Image (cartoon, rainbow, N blue to C red):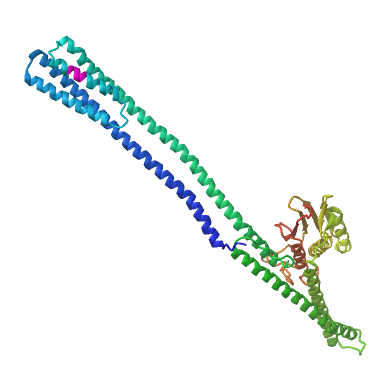
Amino acid sequence: MLRISFRRVMLAGFVLIILLLGGMAVRSWLVVERFVSQSRQGGELALQLTASIQELGESTVDVERSARQFLVLGDAVIRQRFDENIAHSLAAVDRLELIAASPLGGLLADWRATAEQLKAGLDGGMHKAELAPLLARLVQLNEDMKAVGQHWVEFQNAQVLLELERNRLRLGWQLITALLGALVVATAMGWWLMRPMRHLERAITRLGEKRFDEAVVVGGPADLRQLGRRLDWLRLRLAELEADRERMLRHVSHELKTPLTALREGVSLLREEVPGPLGDSQREVVEILQHNVLALQRQIESLLSLNAASFEARRLEYSPVSLRAFLTEAVRRRELQAQARHLSLQVEAADSEVSVDAAKLAVVVDNLLSNAIDFSPEGGEVSVRATLDEAGVRLECADQGPGVASEDIERIFEPFVQGQRRAPMPRRGSGVGLSIVRELVRAMGGQVGLLPSSRGAHFYVDIPNERQ
């Protein structure tokens, strides 16, 4: 297996994203640079072409004027001026021919041939009527070159704009591809990294819930796999400590029960005055002993019950259960206790079948009902409700008693914690009932808590339905 660390994966992902987006940025910059260069070259060519055509047109006017003057006056100075104008015009024609991709090739050749004919006609003494078509031809050629040059400039501009549009579309698709590539890289990197992180989170949650039966296996980068192995070592160590704790509790409880039993029997003999009659003060001391012995016995039994619940929570046995029948049976077991307080027990549940650990769920409901009955006022009502949805099963138990103080909500499920608000009648509980509820509910992968209520306590229990 590749030993790739978390930091290397992050670095590789960022480098890939930077390469994708950076490559796109460089590509865009190169396209812009090429477009600017083409625009600059096209502008320079258009400026040279336009300036040369305009210069040729002005020179042609001078050629026509000097030719007409020479025909009328026959002056040698005017003929020299004509030759100079012709030479200037031919220089402009030469410059036009040197322009790359010039569209005036044929027109320039015609202009040069016509100029040569005009010059030859003046040298040969041609009449004005014979030279007039040649002069008109030069003017017409200038107009044609001006029109062709304008059309060429417009065509070049259109080509540049067309190339820009093609590059814009190409850059758009390349940008979309780069963004999608970056998204794919980020998603793949996130999936590869977040999956072991979720495994770690679930493993830590199981450790916090004292569920040490499932090994911690984490994939992904090497450092996360190493962290998973350390967590699995911690799981094994915690399981050993938990086993030692339970074993110690069993031994301590057993060692305490033997002398406690003897002490209780001795106190009972004293109360029955078997050794001899007791005075009033002696009887009072015996009553105090009896009360504390019974309290100590209840504490030890509660410790054993909590220890047994922690042990049983590790073994789950699921079976199909009808919600309504299950709750009806749970309420029936508490009918005598409720009748003694003139309480009304209400059951609301759909006739649905779920897959749960019936034995553990029965202990949960029984503890919640016992608490609700103890804290309910005389003639009150206790309601038990069950609902089923996609998430699983929700059980609710509500009473009309004093409820739970806000400062006790966070600690009411801790062992041996009893809330500030007292029950209407004296109770013999030791404060482990709700701790057992929480232990068993967590073992079944659920959660237990309190719902806001204007009167009394309203407990809820959420448990996954294993059939789903």
Quarter of the image where the N terminus is located: bottom right
Is-magenta flag for residue 116? Answer: yes
230 and 37: which one is in front? 37
327 and 229: which one is in front? 229
Residue 220 in the image: x percent, y percent?
62, 60
Residue 62 vs 203, above or below: the answer is above
Chief secondary structure of the magenta span?
helix
Residue 95 in the image: x percent, y percent?
23, 30
Q: Which residue is drawn at 14% across and 12% down?
A: 126
317 and 217: which one is in front? 217
Residue 31 in the image: x percent, y percent?
40, 41
Instruction: Please give the range of residues in magenta.
Output: 114-118
Q: In which quarter of the image is residue 419?
A: bottom right
Can residue 429 be seen here? no
Can residue 296 be seen here? yes
Q: Which residue is drawn at 50% across and 46% down?
A: 178
Residue 434 vs 391, above or below: the answer is below
Most extreme residue toward the right is 274
Q: Quadrant of residue 364?
A: bottom right
Q: In this view, does 16 lie to the left or right of 60?
A: right
